[in-house]
Image (cartoon, rainbow, N blue to C red):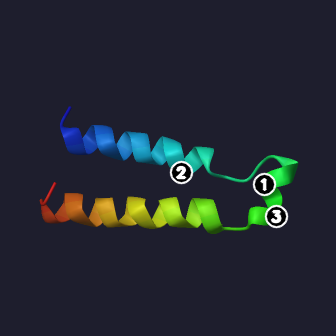
Amino acid sequence: MSIGTILLIVLILILIGAIPLWPHSRAWGYGPSGGIGLIVVILIILLVMGVI
């Protein structure tokens, strides 16, 4: 496995963990998962371009 694949798997797990499931985190909205999702999209673009 390359470092890019491992990084992508870890970031997808972080994205799943940022979904607001607990009652106290439902008021957060899309902030945590949206920010992590943006990072995942940027990393996917970099992987496709061959930078990483």
Q: Are marks 3 and 1 in contact (CB under 8 Å)?
A: yes
Q: Which mark is residue 25?
A: 1
The secondary structure type at the circle numbered 2 is helix
Spatial CA distance of label 3 from label 1 is 5 Å
- Residue at image point 61% right, 44% down: 17
Amino acid identity at mark 2: Leu
Q: Position of residue 38 (x, y in %)?
A: 45, 67
Q: Residue furthest top?
A: 1
Q: Residue furthest right?
A: 23
Q: Is residue 28 left or right of residue 35?
A: right
Q: Callout 2: few (<14), some (14-19), or many (20+) C-alpha neighbours within 10 Å?
A: some
Question: Residue 33: x percent and y percent?
Answer: 59, 60
Residue indicated by mark 3: 27
Identified at 53% across, 51% down, the residue is 15
First in sequence: mark 1 or mark 2?
Answer: 2
Q: Residues within 10 Å of mark 3 (few under 14, many from 20)?
A: few
- Residue 14 position in % (x across, y down): 51, 45
Quarter in which the N terminus is drawn: top left
* Circle 1: element type: helix
Which mark is in front, 2 or 3?
3
List the residue tagged with mark 2: 15
